[in-house]
Amino acid sequence: MNSLDDVDLALLEIYSTGIPSERADILKLRSILEVGAKISAEQKNFKEFERFSTQLEALGKSYPDLGYSENTLLLNSLRFLDLLADKKYDEFNLAAESLSQEVKNKSNAIKYVLEISDCLFGGAYEKLWTLRNREPSPAFTMFFEKLGVSHRNEMSQRIAKSYLSLSIEDTGQFVMVGEGPEAKNKVKELAAQNGWTVDDNSNRVFFAQIQQHASQTAQSFTFPSRRIIATTLQRVREYESIV
């Protein structure tokens, strides 16, 4: 099966004689749904991915003794990454804790997402960005992009609250836009969206325009201290000197 149309045809065929009840047919159904979810992710089709994932989740609850396939672990890791992108950290932690050590050791996809979570929770944003170049499957791209947007929005609020200004380079590191001229343009786009000022002469971003708004809403957010942000910036520079 190479397309979603192929997947839908396979589903029609397996349901043509009724709801599968034999183990072999149930495993075949799971395999078809897993292929559909994987293709959907690779095509960055959230709607179809959710459709297949919902069916897989229901199937797993009805038949908990089916075990794991390689695609099962891949799709679980995609769902875990989606939880991180949606900031559903409690759900992610519960899901991660439910995994056996055997599963963690067996699946590179699971290891990859757990490494992402370690970077995210530990504030190692410079390493988090480099993990994008190590995606174990093209299916991860859609979710990593979603995580990037989520992280970018959160960090935009945090740095604007903690600093009056930062260099364009440091701002780019925090919001995970990479390096070079393209990264600078992305920082400028983000600045325009948030009402920041970019001064090309000093190569700095000034956050004063949103400072007042941030202070008014400070009680509803928990922001890192200047020391934490400064420490993270130092880690960024140390990491860059190593690589």
Image: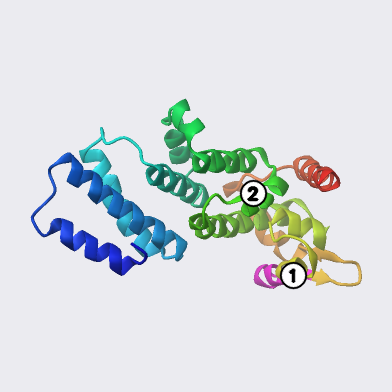
Q: Residue furthest right?
A: 201
Of callouts 1 and 2, which one flags the residue occurring earlier in the amino acid sequence?
2
In this rendering, the answer to whether 60 lies above or below 145 is: above
**Dot in front, 1 or 2:** 2
Residue annotated with mark 1: 182
Residue 131 shows which numbered tag? 2
**Residue 54: in sight, yes or no?**
no
Residue 240 relative to residue 217: left or right: right
In this rendering, the answer to whether 67 lies above or below 49 is: above
Type of residue at label 1?
Glu
Which residue range is magenta in the image? 188-197
- Is 107 magenta? The answer is no
Q: Residue furthest left?
A: 17
In terms of image quadrants, where is residue 8?
Answer: bottom left
The image's colour scheme reads rainbow
Type of residue at label 2?
Leu
User: In the rendering, at what x and y percent does residue 123 appear?
Assistant: 68, 42
**Residue 162: in sight, yes or no?**
yes
Local SS, label 1: helix
Magenta span: helix, strand or loop, mainly?
helix
Local SS, label 2: helix
User: In the rendering, at what x and y percent does residue 106 appear?
Assistant: 48, 34
